[in-house]
Image (cartoon, helix red, strand yellow):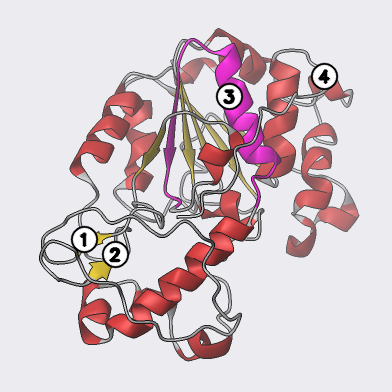
Amino acid sequence: MASRFSRRRVSCTHNECQNSSSQTAEHGVNHLSSTPGIDNSPAHAFPAALLAALREAKHVVVLSGAGVSAESGVPTFRDAMTGLWSRFDPAELATPEAFERDPELVWGWYEWRRMRALQALPNPAHLAIAGMSDHLPQLTLVTQNVDDLHERAGSDTVIHLHGSLHQPRCATCGRSHAFPDEMPNEPEGGRRLPPPRCTRCRGLIRPGVVWFGESLPEGAFYQAQEAAENCDLLISVGTSSLVYPAAGLPHLAKAHGSLLVQINPQPTNLDGHATWNIVGAAGKILPALVAAAWEMDTLAAPTQRPARQR
């Protein structure tokens, strides 16, 4: 199916936008509208074949990565660490070994991250994905993010491949644990914090995320694979396409005949495989894409849900 459409990188041709610092939200739409061969009017800033494929799709899969949450101010593993955490590489804290070695350090870091995630608000990319589902027979949202911004934007069903900051569990017996009904109040510089104990076995409660070296949740990954194998169109947005097995989902979809759309500010390993590469910030590109596909002047935002306090 993908062979019917030419592959191209939709990118900005303005001289002032050629440096990497300008490939951001300020010029997200310009990257599209200024590309040679594409009509500059707002309704035609995207290739017609892409808009048709989106409108006609029976099942769309959206795979979202850290870049989407980063536009809401949620720190990524690539961001410089501050305060107590400045002495550590995030990858060193996100392991079972780190938690076993120093549970207070790791729990304190994840409570700080949970606070930052709860303080953040869904951005236009989250809202556009939620709104897209109103126009499609089926949309499956698969995320590598561990926050709940997609849910708060109005997406009803989200497959969390890497777990959730909001669903901790016992490190010993696996029992789920509920957070108290208040926002974490962590100092900006961070602190060490003793993890709570399991009410059943008295084991330590651990963050409900997938750490390096751990397997993905079996049920979640099976759902994601099944969706990738049966979709007409897969949109990869805000992901580096480096972290497997999640990075393999677009390739699985393509092998089963799906078209691929990549939305990212920077090149990735998916560039040579995607049907359409759109360079820019997700919060600029996705609302414009949805509005153009269904010929709307503006994209009505779904009702946002309040941040959970647990």
Give x and y (percent) for residue 212: 28, 66
Q: Indicate the amino acid at tag 4.
A: Ala
| Quadrant of the drawing holding the N terminus | top left
> Dot 3 surroundings within 10 Å: few (below 14), some, or many (20 or more)?
few
Secondary structure of the residue carrying tag 1 is loop
Looking at the image, tell me whether mark 2 or mark 3 is earlier in sequence order: 3
Residue 135 within the segment the image draws in magenta: yes
191 left or right, relative to 22: left
Three-letter code, disc 2: Trp
From the viewer's perspective, is residue 192 above or below residue 173? below
The disc label shown at residue 214, or none: 1
User: Which segment is the magenta one?
Assistant: 121-145
Q: Can residue 281 be spotted in the picture?
A: yes
**Tags 1 and 2 in contact by the CB under 8 Å rule?**
yes
Residue at 69% x, 16% y is 293
Per the image, label 3 sits on a secondary structure element best described as loop
178 on left or right of 174? right
Element under label 2?
Answer: loop
| Residue 79 percent across, percent down from the top left | 57, 72
Q: Which residue in the structure is indicated by mark 4?
A: 43
The residue carrying mark 3 is 6
The answer to whether the residue labelled 1 contacts the one labelled 3, judged by CB atoms less than 8 Å apart, is no
The type of residue carrying mark 1 is Glu
**What whole-number distance in Å separates the C-alpha atoms at marks 1 and 3?**
38 Å
Badge 1, how many Cα within 10 Å: few under 14, some, many 20+? few
Residue matched to label 2 = 211
Q: Residue 44, image x and y in percent?
A: 80, 20
Q: Image check: 309 left or right of 36?
A: left
Say if 231 sits above or below 76 in the image.
above
Give the Cα separation between the discs numbered 4 and 3.
21 Å
Task: Inspect the magenta stretch and tell me whether residue 156 lies in it.
Answer: no
